[in-house]
Amino acid sequence: MTTTTLSLEDVLTRYEPVLGLEVHVELGTRTKMFCGCPTTFGAEPNTQVCPVCLGLPGSLPVANRAAVEATIRIGLALNCQIATWCRFARKNYFYPDMPKNYQISQYDEPLCFDGWLDVEVEPGRTVRVGIERVHLEEDTGKTQHIGGATGRIHGATESLVDYNRAGIPLVEIVTKPITGTGALAPAVARAYVTTLRDVIRALGVSDVRMEQGSLRCDVNTSLHPVGATEWGTRTETKNVNSLRSVERAVRSEILRQAAVLDAGGQVIQETRHFHENTGETSPGRSKETATDYRYFPEPDLVPLAPDPAWVEKLRAELPEMPAVRRRRLAAAWKLSDADMQAIVNAGALDLIEATVAAGAAPEAARKWWLGELSRVANEQGVELSELPVTPTHVAELQTLVDSGRLNDRLARVVLEGVLAGEGTPEQVMAARGLEVVSDLGALEAAVDEAIAANADAAEKVRGGKVAAAGVLVGAVMKATRGQADAKKVRELILRKLGVEG
Ligand code: ZN
Ligand code: MN
């Protein structure tokens, strides 16, 4: 069935979407959730395992305090209630990458519940997303299918399991149903995951990298006719791996379900897979209900009962939230919402803030990071923060420009040297002999030469055609290999030719 003939705007005049987002975040703790194994990403397969995370008989789990603390901090940042007493639960199912045959999770007693997150969907339009629960569980291992063309099990000759990831602490954040968004639904979904990622990053509890799987998103979508009191059947699109895909998955699922309903059909409750290449979803397994997992309280672990004084201490120590920080910095730097958005999108906010802290004016700091340095980062296919240049370097470079020792062109050459690992801007200047010629005698000599060599232009300037001075300025800049202050050169030329600029 094709969905390309329907437009989202048209569909959403007839149907109302309801969204629900489930986000899994791998915590950046040093050790796993229930054992002391390290959690380093990318280690040799099955080198970070022990009897506990391999589920060997007789091994017993112990909860990781740092993971509990990180989860409470996430809950507090999302305006949740924190349970005074709760338990872990066993979620029973078979999967080869889950050696115990159950996942230790939380069921009816989540650590954090009933919160909200304000999400700015577009400038001036904020949607409050309700948070149902934030609970703590453990990650599974990873299965690799070898021999097939797609990396999927179909066509593979063998499957290998890596248990390094098994038992890494995982926080699951579940929204309440998101209603009333209409045609904004795809944008709301994307803005929610973006905002949530920024909050978790600000807390410093995870690196939240979607491409490495430390933030994974499942998107629940349903449609019901506008005005209907009962919601439609929902589908769950699994493991959507980028912010853009979150938006596309919602859009494509709304269009698909609308086509089914328009044709008089019924949406089937199932999981679906999102395909990056086509932007469409395909059916996965028909969805289990919670009772299929035969949840029961985990008998090997004591209940969690966070001391209220500890929780209040964690609340008091929460960092400034990203939205608050952006508003504060935009005001201090006199930036529009769009300017601030551009900085955030470029991943430059921390860098610019540090550059300003190192002494640069906000406008200059912004110019370097969003201009020359963004261009270089783009060219090299790296993040700005991965470039071998620090905010201190950039502030120093700008000081050299402000003091007249470098002009814009020389500053860019010096920056090249810094990026090539030749040292600080001062060191690059010294090593490469780059500095604006400030010796007035040398400059005057260069100006005299230029006037002598370009008599025509000089005559025009004397006659009042000041624009002709450009030729002379160019000649001096060439003679000094760009190391003169063009403004000063122009002043000198005009004075010598009897024209006051
Ligand atoms: Zn272990
Ligand atoms: Mn989960």
Image (cartoon, helix red, strand yellow):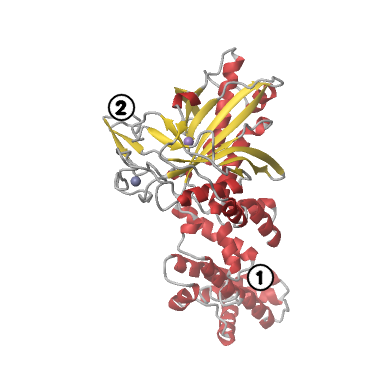
In the rendered image, which residue does mark 1 sit on? 468
Q: Residue at x 42, y 66 (%)?
A: 420
From this view, report whether residue 259 is shown above or below residue 199.
Answer: above
Does the image show residue 75?
Answer: yes
Rendered residue at 66%/27% (across/down): 9
Hey, what amino acid is under mark 1? Answer: Ala
Q: Secondary structure at mark 2?
A: loop
Q: Quadrant of the C terminus?
A: bottom right
Disc 2 crowd, CA 10 A, few/some/many (<14, 14-19, 20+): few
Residue 483: give x, y in percent of width and height. Answer: 53, 75
Across and down, in percent, residue 200 comes to 54, 49
Count of marks placed on residues: 2
Residue 371 makes an appearance in the image = no
Query: Mark 1 vs ligand 2: CB under 8 Å?
Result: no
User: Where is mark 2, residue-wise?
Assistant: 155
Task: Looking at the picture, tell me which residue is in the foreground, 30 or 440.
Answer: 30
Quadrant of the image occupied by residue 463: bottom right
Ligand 2 is within 8 Å of the C-beta of the residue at disc 2: no
Compared with 8, 317 (above or below) is: below
Specify whether 415 is left or right of 78. Answer: left
Q: Name the amino acid, label 2.
A: Gly
Residue 27 numbered mark, or none: none
Q: Give x and y (percent) for residue 278.
A: 48, 30
- Nearest the camera: 214 or 82? 82
Percent position of residue 344, x then y: 59, 52
Left or right: where does residue 114 sit relative to residue 205? right
